Image (cartoon, helix red, strand yellow):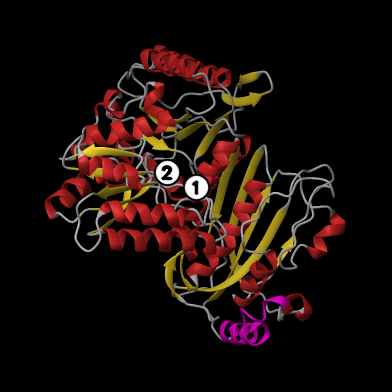
Amino acid sequence: MELEEKEFDLTKVVEGVVELFYPVGLKKGVDVILDLQVNKFSQVKGDEGRLKQILSNLLSNAIKFTSEGNVYVRAWARKRRLQNSRCAHDEESAGCCLLFRTTEAIDEVHHHHHDDPNSMEFVFEVNDTGKGIPKEKQASIFENYVQVKETETAPKIEGTGLGLGIVQSLVRLMGGEISIVDKEVGEKGTCFRFSVVFKACVSDLSEDNKTVKSSPPKQGYNSSIVVLFISSDERRKMAQNFIAEQGIKVLAVKNICQLSESLREFRRQEEEQNRSSSDLSLSFGYLNWPTLTLTSNGVQARKRNDNEASHVPNFILLVIDTTRVDFNELCKAVAEFRKDSKNACSRIVWLGSKCIQLQGLDQKKLPPSDIIIPMPLHGSRLHSLIHLLPEFGAPTHANHQQMTKRNRTQEEEEIVRFSMSSSSPLRGKKVLVAEDDSLQQMIAKKILLKLGVSFEMCRNGKEAFAMVTKGLSHQRNLGASHILPYEYVFMDCQMPEMDGCEATRLIRLEEKDYGVHIPIIGLTAHAEGVELNRFIEAGIDINISKPLNEHKILKVIEDLHTRK
């Protein structure tokens, strides 16, 4: 099997795989975190599909064998080392020779990349807090079809369908190696590290490979602070480090108590400034502000030394995680800050799940400058966050909370468009729409775009069945057959070549081989009658009578969730 090399965006691909597994981990209470540091070399040429297979397999296994804590994915780029990683253990690859011309293919890949000055080595780690693999069994883990059990009598957890021996062959085929990283004594879980070689699509690799900032900060605006309130310790540390690397001051707090104390300290200093300054038009002036320090007892302030910088933040970006907290207490703390900080130039970003609207937070009811961003916060969303700061081009006027749509920056507009649909239960979902009528297709597209849905369209039942079948097969090849290719299928009843009833019946038969059930929403001309009865018998879960509208779609999604 040969590599299919093409140019692609590495950041988008890795984010896409991680976000595919994020909700899977969420159901188990396991956070899936991504720390991606490949900005400068994000545009690469290589086999995108093979990389997805490798990551999907490792992530699927990590989540499956982790019952609490997190799965942490790290990725970084480095100049390719001059090494001979030719298949060192040919006997380990013997079981894969029917699938790959292992030795010859790897030789060819290494020779190809060795001669390319733009070749870069990309290193990935998938680190979990699960039970871990005993040291004495790690040597055999890359043998095909081997699954390590905690004890001989322990139940065997269903695998993903892609053995680690095959994963190893894929990694070597892409010019790299895979291994298990030793952990500290007492540290839980397993950490897989693998590397692959891609051609970086940049003109010059002569510079040292350092993490590249989102964009150079504007001169004269270097006094913003980001107050970061995220429940997960590991995600908070990751976001804090990223923001600090951009040259931005960041204060990370881990609970509502610390958040409230931080905000009260901001208000106290604002009042002190207002008393000491005759120029009340300044939001946060340049006075001798204390340094805020987080301790085990909360936030403490200490007086600055004479040789310390005396300027204080003139812009506060408050980033608030609404998951796993007392939402009412959180809202009280923020409301108190808004009320008492009338002169403050600040902005609030709310982080939440798809159920954020059910918690009482609605984009339409928030101040115009507030933004809702759905979790997980990482990668491109973190970069977008940075562009809300004056240092990176955001408006700096004091009446920022009166900001209107016409004076938002391009970066802000992108986030607002993204976040306006974040409260939708369909936000980020992938659906298939089978509809032959052009007008109905146009209506469906408009509604789904508004709701933040990723969707595909087809015009008859035959195409719908083929797309679902292909999707199921693709997920199985990725080692993630338990993840649906489409979270919902909107199926019209009357279509040419093959109607919706027959397509639904065939899909239900096909699903039995995979042990899954895709919710199918029937689209009918009438709310009752023979047509609907045939559709129900074929296996639809629920139906919508045409014409489509946003209310009807949201109602059936709510009904489906209620049934679970």
Closer-to-camera residue (376/158): 158
Closest to the observer: 464 or 307?
Answer: 464
Q: Residue at x 41, y 42 (%)?
A: 385
Which residue matches tag 2? 386
- Residue 105 in the image: above or below residue 21: below
Disc with the residue nearer the chain's start (1 vs 2): 1
From the viewer's perspective, tell me whether residue 346 is left or right of residue 183.
left
276 lies above or below 312:
above
Residue 467 belongs to the span the image colors magenta: no
Q: Find the distance from the CA under tag 1 to the CA under tag 2.
A: 8 Å
Q: Write down the region rendered in magenta.
A: 95-114
How packed is label 2: few (under 14 Cα within 10 Å), some, or many (20 or more)? many
Identify the residue under disc 1: 246
Q: Quadrant of residue 185?
A: top right
Residue 234 placed where, x, y %? Answer: 62, 39
Dividing the picture into quadrants, the one containing residue 143 is bottom right
Residue type, mark 1 in image: Gln
Residue 165 location, x and y as percent? 70, 68
**Amino acid identity at mark 2:** Ile
Helix or strand or loop: what does disc 2 sit on?
helix
Residue 100 in magenta stretch: yes
The residue shown at (83%, 46%) is 153
Vertical order, 258 against 417 (above or below): above
Query: Pointer 1 and pointer 2: residues touching (CB < 8 Å)?
Result: yes
Quadrant containing the N terminus in the rendered view: bottom right
Residue positioned 65% across, 86% down in the render:
107
